Amino acid sequence: MPGEPLERTAGEHEEARQRFVLEDTGFREVPEKYRRFYRYWQGPGDELGLNEVLCPVCKVVVRSTRELRPGDRLYCMACMTRMRIRRGADGRLEADCEY
Ligand SMILES: [Zn+2]
């Protein structure tokens, strides 16, 4: 899908990935056709979906039409950062910057 932040998947169990329909939640920092791939983070109580990860640089929620897995690579258009997904200490998905 054009503009999808998920650039490269880890390549495992592709067929089993859950799919998500994204809606524009009013994120205004990227062009309109990409807005549904981002949303504002509401803070520590904000539960992220299986298709969402917090950008480590600009702290917006980056969203995919597919479930995210460790090893996936994403691009945050809001701050132009490339990142890689890993599983954090608490079991949830986190992202590290890649340069
Ligand atoms: Zn970002």
Image (cartoon, rainbow, N blue to C red):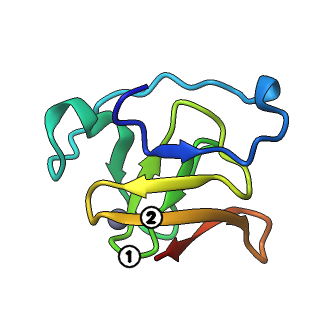
The x and y percentages for residue 4 are 42, 37
Q: Nearer the viewer, residue 3 or 87?
A: 3
Task: Tell me the kind of residue under disc 1.
Answer: Val
Residue at the disc numbered 1: 57
33 relative position to 6: left or right:
left
> Residue shown at 43%/51% (left/top)?
62
Counting residues from the N terminus, which is met first, the one under dot 1 or under dot 2? 1
Would you identify the image quadrant in which residue 16 lies? top right
Q: Are marks 1 and 2 in contact (CB under 8 Å)?
A: no
17 relative position to 64: left or right:
right
Would you identify the image quadrant in which residue 3 lies? top left
Q: Is residue 71 above or below residue 69?
A: below
Judge whether residue 8 can be spotted in this image. yes
Residue at the disc numbered 2: 82
Question: Cβ of disc 1 within 8 Å of ligand 1?
Answer: yes
Q: Nearer the viewer, residue 90 or 13?
A: 13
Q: How many marks?
A: 2
Q: Nearer the viewer, residue 30 or 74?
A: 74
Q: Nearer the viewer, mark 1 or mark 2?
A: 2
